[in-house]
Amino acid sequence: MEDLKKQIVEQLNLLHIKPADIGDDQPLFIEGLGLDSIDALELIVLLQQQYGIKLNNAEDGPQVFRTVRTMADYIKTHRAKQD
Amino acid sequence: MYNPSAQVYVAGIGVVSAIGNNAAECFHALEKGQAGIGSITGLETRYRGHLPVGEVKLSNEELSSITGLPVTASRTALLGLLAAREAVEDAGMSTPGNLRVAFVSANSVGGMDKSEKFFARFMEHAGGGRLRNVVNHECGAVTELVADALSVKHHITTISTACSSGANSIFYAARLIRHGLADAVIAGGADALTGFTLNGFNTLQILDASPCMPFDENRRGLNLGEGAGYLVLVSEKTAAGLRANLYGRLTGYANANDAHHQTASSPDGTGAYLAMKEALERSGLQPNDISYINLHGTGTFNNDSSEGIAVSRIFSVPYPPMSSTKAYTGHTLAASGSIEAVFSLQALRRQVVYPNLRLHTPMAALPFVPVKTFRNATVNHVLSNSFGFGGNCSSLIFSKA
Amino acid sequence: MKTYILASACISPQQSFTTGRFHDKIMGWQGNRLRAAEPDYSPYIDSKAIRRMSRIIKMGTAAAMECLQRAAITMPGAIVMGTAYGCLEDTGVFLKKMIGQQEEMLTPTAFIQSTHNTIGAQIALLLQCHHYNNTFVHRGFSFERALQDAMMLLEENAAAHVLTGAADEITDASFDILSRFGLYKRQPVSNNSLFSEKSTGTIAGEGAAFFLLTGHPSPGKPVLEGLHTFYKPVDEAEVFSETRRFLEAQHIQPGDIDLLILGRNGDAESDEIYTRLRQALFTGTEWITYKQLSGEYPTSTAFALWLAAEIAKDGHVPHHPDPNFSPRKILLYNHYENIHHSFMLLTI
């Protein structure tokens, strides 16, 4: 998850935020980190580029990206499927 | 001196889109329900065969041959000149004489169809790429190619406010006339398909991989289109001097900003609501005076929802007939406001309303259903909406001459 | 109706953004590319928004917000701006990725930011301004058109205050490309010696400038009396007659002008017309240039207007031998590549 936090900070150009500052279970969207729909699209590309995972249903986005932990779980599950 | 009640007439129209190469052809297609959405044939892209678009059915070679511009000119300029010249001839203004004629155009990415080709070579090495492909990259440069070909010098400008650009051009032109700064204005917009735009919209995941379904409950997104539309707007005095059949008057217009998000529209349709409301106020009309609404209706979940709510905030039973013609042409971006202005004026002249194609399931959240068939109607006033990125929302109202 | 400039703010290659005497510290640049001196943006844009913004969007937004603050206006009745090139950095980033990654795995931010109306839209978003919002993208007329639209809105009573301005940037790519067109000086040059030798080419510049305009009588504020543009004049006679017509429309004689601010850019050929015009109509009139400060770019007249307003307000011309010289009628004349010519008359 620490790697994932670093990637999120980089991809979304989150200045003034250190990866360590992002809580594992902190909501990423609306409240919490306050990300928006454009950030969601950026995260979808991040999943593809870094982990080779394609989010088939864009509507799953809010669930998958709810927190760093939900993202990490999704990556773990789908990576396993691809092996 | 500014005269707010000076009448502004439309003396000529010109258009080229996926459904026709001129006004008559487009109208014929609108009447027959013949959409122009299909596979990409012109653009070199991996999305050929995957994303449907509304292409103009003329190659650059053909456009060059018809317009006289070099084949190396940006397709946006080629399309623009084709439509602008049709409007000028339609208005009987081919020799402007002593008239102060202005050209107000719009486009979203200028000569990008050529510059993206340049850039690919330029990326390989700093000396790469042919300069002629990038010399007319700027939005304004494309406009000047057309202005020069039309011999217009008095006042030339380009507006670029994303999808509301074409509508903004038209009412800016009307204001020039009301301020006494021009006698006649050729106003509208043009946009050609480019890899830049196609890929850009694709990253937003708002493109439909099938022909789009505006205002349908199960809509999936928009199809990009290309084309150009121009009006010749004239003052009362100029109208009297031309031997043109007037199409109508521009009686209402407004430009409002949604100020909600860079690309998404607000859930309650604030910008759209304000634009329509202010356009009505300027025209002095009541909502129930509107005979037909040409909706922006791109087919995206967000726009149609937002616009639908805004419409229901202003209009009530009995709702005027309304439809989005983007199911025919695709979303022509900066040209959309002006292409749809042309369609609106044709509706006014021919006393018809257009169907909203591919509408199977009306949106459950809305209290109205768009028109499903082409039919005759009493049309006195038409409202045309154009809403874009950056929250730029514009509405135009055309009334009988 | 007169157009008053209530306030202005300008980010440029000079220390123009801070209030006070920027001319005490004229920035000297070596080479043919001037870069904007960027301020700390944090007072103007919150971190959530700023992370997405490229340079030009930050420059335009900060200049606009600072201008509003100086005018003590929280909500303008309209926002109108001009940009010739738009958001070049974002455009370049998206193009590079699109081509380099063969249209795969592209991200939306650069594309969204590349649209020409992004700056105007961003300002509206920060202010929650739902009013008229327009962007002109027309080469060397981009700023003039925005200014004229603003003046029209005021005349129409459509707005009590209009926030109007322009922004343009130079990126590594655009500088390389424009260089290939032969726009810039080839030999070593400093902006401070831009006019000392006769050679071709100019120096590149960039910047953002915003103005808060009102039609409401505002004593003590500079007045934009007139604005006029003309396109591709065929010869110098046409330039002279346009000048005469403009002045006549303002009901003044060439001799009434106290100060000319001329858009000489160091290119010997394209600078000729300024000399010829002075000889024809303005012999004896004081004149200064501004592109040694701003560099050359299509919306540099926004910098020129800012400079004119500063001179009018301060009541003196920077580095002028006569400290009591206080011009009250200032005429700006500029052309961009002999295609786009414009006049602005400022009085106080």
Image (tube, coloured by chain):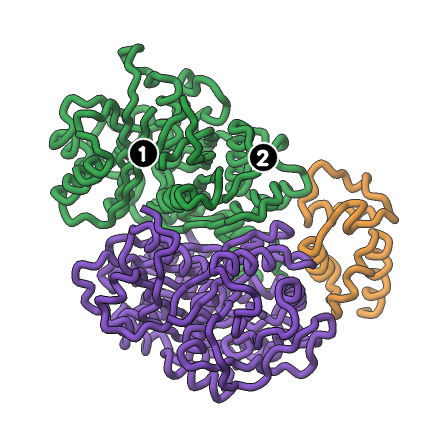
Judging by the rendered image, the residue that carries numbered circle 1 is: C225
Q: Would you say residue C326 is visible in this rendering?
A: yes
Q: Residue furthest bottom?
A: B32
Callout 2: SS:
loop
Residue type, numbered disc 2: Thr
In the displayed structure image, the side of residue B152 where residue B308 appears, left or right: right
Q: Is residue B70 above or below residue C143?
A: below
Residue beneath disc 2: C74
Chain shown in orange: A
Q: Is residue C26 shown above or below B81? A: above
**Which shade of the palette goes to chain C?**
green
Residue B272 at x, y = what percent? Answer: 59, 59
Element type where label 1 sits in the image: strand
Q: CA distance from mark 2 to mark 1?
A: 25 Å
Seen in the picture, residue B106 relative to C258 is either above or below; the reply is below
| Position of residue C27 measured from the top left corner of the image (x, y, whole percent) | 41, 23
Which mark sits nearer the N-terminus, 2 or 1?
Answer: 2
Q: Examine the image and state in which quarter residue A20 appears.
A: top right
Q: Quadrant of the C terminus of chain C?
A: top left
Q: Colour of chain B?
A: purple
Q: Is residue A8 above or below residue B339?
A: above
Residue type at numbered disc 1? Glu
User: Going by the image, does C296 lie left or right of B298?
Assistant: left
